[in-house]
Image (cartoon, coloured by chain):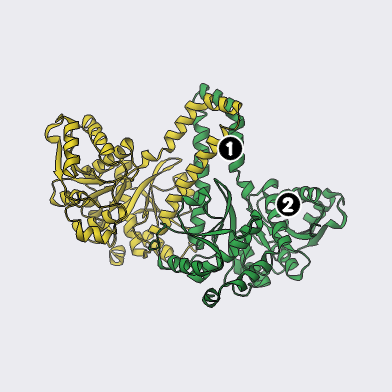
Chain colours: A green, B yellow
Amino acid sequence: MTRKVTIALDVMGGDHGPQTVLPAALATLERDDSVSFTLVGLPEVLEQAQHDSKGAYGSRLGFLPATEVVEMDEPPADALRRKKNSSLRLVIEQVKSGEADACVSSGNTGALMATARYVLKMLPGIDRPAIIAAVPTLRGRSFMLDLGANVGCSADHLLQFAIMGSVVAGDMLDIDNASVGLLNIGQEDIKGNEVVREAGDLLSRSGLNYVGFVEGDAVFRGVADVIVSDGFVGNIALKTMEGVASLIASYLREEFEKSGLRKLQGLVAAPTLAALRSRLDTRRYNGASLVGLNGVVIKSHGGADKLAFETAINIAIVEARKGVPVQIGKLIEDQPEACIRAL
Amino acid sequence: MTRKVTIALDVMGGDHGPQTVLPAALATLERDDSVSFTLVGLPEVLEQAQHDSKGAYGSRLGFLPATEVVEMDEPPADALRRKKNSSLRLVIEQVKSGEADACVSSGNTGALMATARYVLKMLPGIDRPAIIAAVPTLRGRSFMLDLGANVGCSADHLLQFAIMGSVVAGDMLDIDNASVGLLNIGQEDIKGNEVVREAGDLLSRSGLNYVGFVEGDAVFRGVADVIVSDGFVGNIALKTMEGVASLIASYLREEFEKSGLRKLQGLVAAPTLAALRSRLDTRRYNGASLVGLNGVVIKSHGGADKLAFETAINIAIVEARKGVPVQIGKLIEDQPEACIRAL
């Protein structure tokens, strides 16, 4: 039997707030009857949502009022100190108290990270939370971390990221022993900076399925299930990926607009181009996990629509069912002594 | 009148050696009668090239024998110490002696960098050479550096890269006052690591057209003519770009192969798809400049074909005609006192 899970959803975050969160939640309730939601937001927003959902899902759709909202540009420290009753904070508190098995928010990333760290605390053996998300590859999907939570990292931090990434990729791809690569500027042992080389040594001695250094282009050939880097490099790589994909999409549009004949060609090729767009659709990759915490916290993109938010909800469901934090804790304990000492 | 230039070409480097270098040189001689070449390589290779070119270009096509070749996987220090009469070394010596105005090699990047630095020396005020190349953007082309010569950099180094990038982009795009951005994980002043923030301060006080921090996706919208980063981050971004472009090309091929109908659609759209491929053709972006040296040194991709090698030759011609090293020297001198002190 599928394990029942409850997910707390912040309906105030993101560009579209409840307009995307509610439809995404309803679609999920319809599809998977072992899932329940608690919507968290300002009372007037919840009233509207309650009205729109017509009580159709009974106790599977709960409502928890918040008194304030964290702004997208609010400094994380301010949000943490002053907004103790915000929707962003309350979804995390739901996870802390065990009333929810996971939470999803499209809100302020920095505030979500700082609040999650403060409320849920780190897992033993993990120094810092990291952000992990899926990227498309020739072979399917790989998981990259850290995508921006930590600008400077030690080799120990990279090892911890590798452990966390290995759990998340294994659960999301439903595989054992996910392969792990270190993002570097060459494959040879002498390449890169000292931190990366030292992390390579630690990973070689770890119990993980470490495949070595991976260059930026090889990531997209799917040479490893998990790609580890510090948050500066990971963020640049992720944004570069997005930038190149939209550059190529623009080129494609321009080329098919160049003449009447080209437009006709575009009409003929439209189904194929739509299939291509769908494969590259960023909404299919929405939802980044904040890992390393005592609880499952998923960040959805601020601009997420219904489909994108559903993708983020699905990540929360999988991670909650599989118990990602507990698994990470176990994998940390399973590390060979050499690595434990390094931690 | 166009200034006459002589370019020394290493015919031994790269995967195809003389098979690409000679045709690229002949095509250039045909097109531009103010250009001369000196081909440098092993005697038997030069004899064949001399035979194939049939003496058609007289003194515009010279030949200089080398006695050895630097291997692609040879440690740079070994090449520098032991192979003083290699084709890679001799093309640089030609620039040093003034017999050539620039040189191009598809050889071992590390050896080319180490040898160029040893033979040509750094420009005053520049601590380290950097690698710069063009990337496609929505608005045309931008120039990124450093692409892998320096894994760890100080803020002063990033400022020096910005100065060098500003000259190269200005010359290659034929514009005054090229705009310069710093690659970072956010646009706000507080984003990124200490080195990047300090470099931002230095650039704000420099005489350069500094536009601020640029995120990985904004690079491809063409928000700045020059994108500055350390060599680790720049290399990851460049390789990520290549990886994503080939991933999308593969997806496109797969989609147009999925059925007989799809194949027909592909045939109809073929001219447009060919135009797209041509816009993304990496051969059109071949040729990286090693900047910061007392001379023009261009690195061509090891897998370059005739067209790609011609692109690299053209960069050498433009940089030689415009005198990039002299311009960099002047721009360093023109920096406000605050920056000069920082240097």
Q: CA distance from mark 2 to mark 1?
A: 27 Å
Give the residue number, with chain letter if any, for mark 2. Answer: A21
Relative to A23, residue A81 above or below: below
Quarter where residue B262 is shown: top right
Q: Nearer the viewer, residue A220 or A331?
A: A331
Please state which amino acid type lies under the numbered disc 2: Val
Q: Nearer the viewer, residue A65 or A180?
A: A180
* Mark 1 crowd level (few <14, some 14–19, many ≥20, 10 Å Cα): some
Please state which amino acid type lies under the numbered disc 1: Leu
Q: Quadrant of the N terminus of chain B?
A: top left
* Mark 2 crowd level (few <14, some 14–19, many ≥20, 10 Å Cα): many
| Location of residue B208 in the rendering, given as x and y in whole percent from the top left corner | 34, 54
Q: Residue furthest bottom?
A: A341
| Location of residue B331 in the rendering, given as x and y in whole percent from the top left corner | 26, 54
Label for residue B93?
none
Give the residue number, with chain letter if any, for mark 1. Answer: A276
| Location of residue A139 in the rendering, given as x and y in whole percent from the top left corner | 56, 47
